[in-house]
Amino acid sequence: MTREDATGECVRLEERVFSVKKRFLEMYRKARAGHVGSSLSCAEILVFLKFAWMRDDDTFVLSKGHAVAALYSVLAEQNLLSQRQIDSFYEDGTLLPALPPFNAFQQIPFATGSLGYGLSVSAGMALGAKLNREDRRFFCVTSDGELDEGSVWEAALFIAHHALTNVVWIIDRNRIQAFGRTEDVLTLEPLDAKLRAFGFHVVAVDGHDFRALSAARDECMRVAGAREVPVAIIADTVKGNGISGMRDTVDCHYTPMDDAGYRQALDELTRAHEALLDGYRDAG
């Protein structure tokens, strides 16, 4: 890919993620629901996976199910959910509840409301595909607080033992969980060294930078093609990214937006989006 092509891809992805963020901010505002910060920390990751990495026969599991508004918004961006469905978010009888539903949409293979299971499910599906000699990949996004669950590490051992190179594990490393900072609740660092000790090729990346995510994708694909080693991406992110009143706070895990907060958030995201596009234009 030429530099011009790479820049063009990043610009297209920036336009996508801005559309996705505007949509889920409106969803949260209307529903008066929390977990805004959780969706903001992984929005670029989900957009990149869906629009720049995954194939049609690949499977995605959002293990951090509390950020499901970001996933619903991405599916709407793909024209897989209608505006009417999006408008029903959180309402009685909706197909779009606060956590990923089971058996409602083909694109959501597992209900991940309880943390710690998404990577295990991905591992099981990946082993089945490997045994059936199916050329399918399974992408799983977990939160970092979720790594407190022992089931995640059991799944990691299983993936490495069976050399499941058809699993791509992305950790949304925003360093905040429900009750505080991850390192205060239960120390994870040195996370990269732990994952390597478990048998993974580890890529650390800025989870809000599409150029960095592109480089991580290329590295993971090279490793998968050359070695029987599974990959894990540590995506360095910020909870509540892009919104001054939420950025890097525990409160943004729970606190809903009022109308004034929504308008401020939309204004800040709009100005940041325009600045990013100007940066790409200046760069070439």
Image (tube, rainbow, N blue to C red):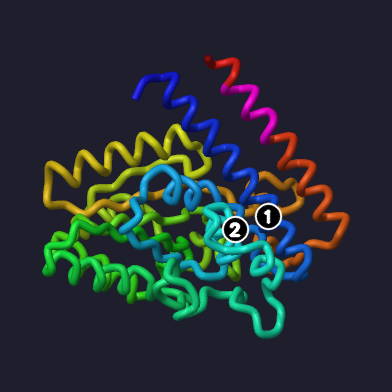
Residue type at numbered disc 1: Arg
Note whether 235 is above or below 81 in the view shown.
Answer: above
Q: Residues within 10 Å of mark 1 (few under 14, many from 20)?
A: many
Residue 276 covered by magenta stretch: yes
List the single residue furthest toward the bottom.
93
Residue type at numbered disc 2: Ser
Whichever of callouts 1 and 2 sits on the residue coming sooner in the sequence is 1
Residue 180 visible, this orientation? yes
Helix, strand or loop status at disc 1: helix
Which region of the structure is painted magenta? 273-280
Per the image, the residue denoted by label 2 is: 73
Note whether 189 is above or below 280 in the view shown.
Answer: below
Per the image, the residue denoted by label 1 is: 23
Residue at x 65% of width, y 53% of height = 240
Note whether 76 is above or below 277 in the view shown.
Answer: below
Which numbered dot is residue 169?
none
Q: Are marks 1 and 2 in contact (CB under 8 Å)?
A: yes
- Which of the image's four quarters has the N terminus? top left
x, y (%) of residue 145? Answer: 48, 65
On screen, residue 257 versus residue 149, left or right, reads right
Residue at x 68% of width, y 55% of height = 23
x, y (%) of residue 139? Answer: 35, 58
